[in-house]
Amino acid sequence: MAQVALKFLIGRKRGMTQRFTEDGRVVPLTVVEAGPCTVTQIRSAEKDGYAAIQVGFEECRPKVLSRPVLGHLGVLKSESAKADSAAKAGKALRVLREARIKDMPAATVGDVATVAAFEKGELIDVEGISKGRGFMGTIRAHHFNRGPASHGSMNIRQPGSVGSSADPSHTFRGTRMALHLGAKKHTAKNLQVFDVDPNSNLIYIYGAVAGPTGGLVVVKRAKTPPPPRKAPPTVKKASQKGGPEKAKK
């Protein structure tokens, strides 16, 4: 088992804090406990049709996982799979995630990836599940205005008319109605790594990340980083023609 420099880690959000920068500014930071993650499978274009790497996170009791997952991880070893069991992780891992990486590192099944692969100031993408808000009405979900609550009004918090009459006699697609709010996958792009603590497996990210404290997140290299800023062109001041004598006239 060796360490591999992989910029794709699974972790859990541990909350938010703040720190001072060198110029005295206070910046908000999200603390993520990422890794260590174990490489559980390496997909190749010859065998699977695409190149990818699969990692696992958070060891657990084998009882909470299904037998197919345990067999995939190499925890269950049958007589017919003795030859293939050596190329398994051999750990019961709760979470498995897969990523397609252009520059595939020289990794083998069983290697470990840590936060040491990320550097201070690097741009990353953080994927998480937003907080679930339950089933919400149109006022909370879409900021509708309510009706009058007096003089016999029967439309206080109702959404109003959503359908149509005989033609076309159906509700149009995309009509804003009551819905289940939150609990969706959200990716915060181009966040900056403020600091990395390999001893505690912590990564401090400048900005907010979707999800509650303790929620599952995926930290990976920025997919679409912004282009570098170009220095503004220097404009030379045009000298006045005619000299000072002509300007006085």
Image (spheres, helix red, strand yellow):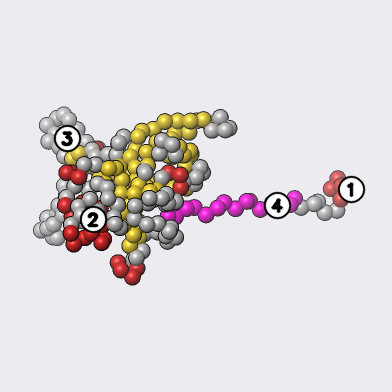
Q: Residue at x 44, y 39 (%)?
A: 198
Q: Which of marks 1 and 2 is nearer the N terminus?
A: 2
The span from disc 1 to disc 2 (Cα, nearest Å) is: 90 Å
Comparing 188 with 66, the one in front is: 66
Q: Are marks 4 and 1 in contact (CB under 8 Å)?
A: no
Q: Outermost residue, left direction?
A: 166
Q: Which of marks 4 and 1 is in front?
A: 4
Q: What stretch is highlighted in magenta?
A: 222-237
**Which amino acid type corresponds to the residue marked 2 in the rendered image?**
His
Q: Where is residue 195 in the image (x, y as percent from the top left)?
A: 48, 38
**Which amino acid type corresponds to the residue marked 1 in the rendered image?**
Glu
Q: Which residue is drawn at 42% across and 55% down?
A: 223
The disc label shown at residue 115, or none: none
In the picture of the structure, the residue carrying the numbered disc 2 is 72
Residue 28 lies, with reference to residue 118, above or below; the image says above
The span from disc 4 to disc 1 (Cα, nearest Å) is: 26 Å
Q: Earlier in the sequence, mark 4 or mark 1?
A: 4
Circle count: 4
Q: Which of marks 2 and 4 is nearer the N terminus?
A: 2
Q: Please, what secondary structure does the residue beneath circle 1 have? A: helix
In the picture of the structure, the residue carrying the numbered disc 3 is 156
Q: Nearer the viewer, mark 1 or mark 2?
A: 2
Q: Nearer the viewer, mark 4 or mark 3?
A: 4
Q: Please, what secondary structure does the residue beneath circle 3 have? A: loop
**Quarter where residue 32 is shown:** top left
The span from disc 2 to disc 3 (Cα, nearest Å) is: 56 Å
The span from disc 4 to disc 3 (Cα, nearest Å) is: 61 Å
Q: Which of marks 2 and 3 is nearer the N terminus?
A: 2
> Is 122 displayed left or right of 209 in the figure?
right
The disc label shown at residue 235, or none: 4
Q: Residue at x 45, y 30 (%)?
A: 18
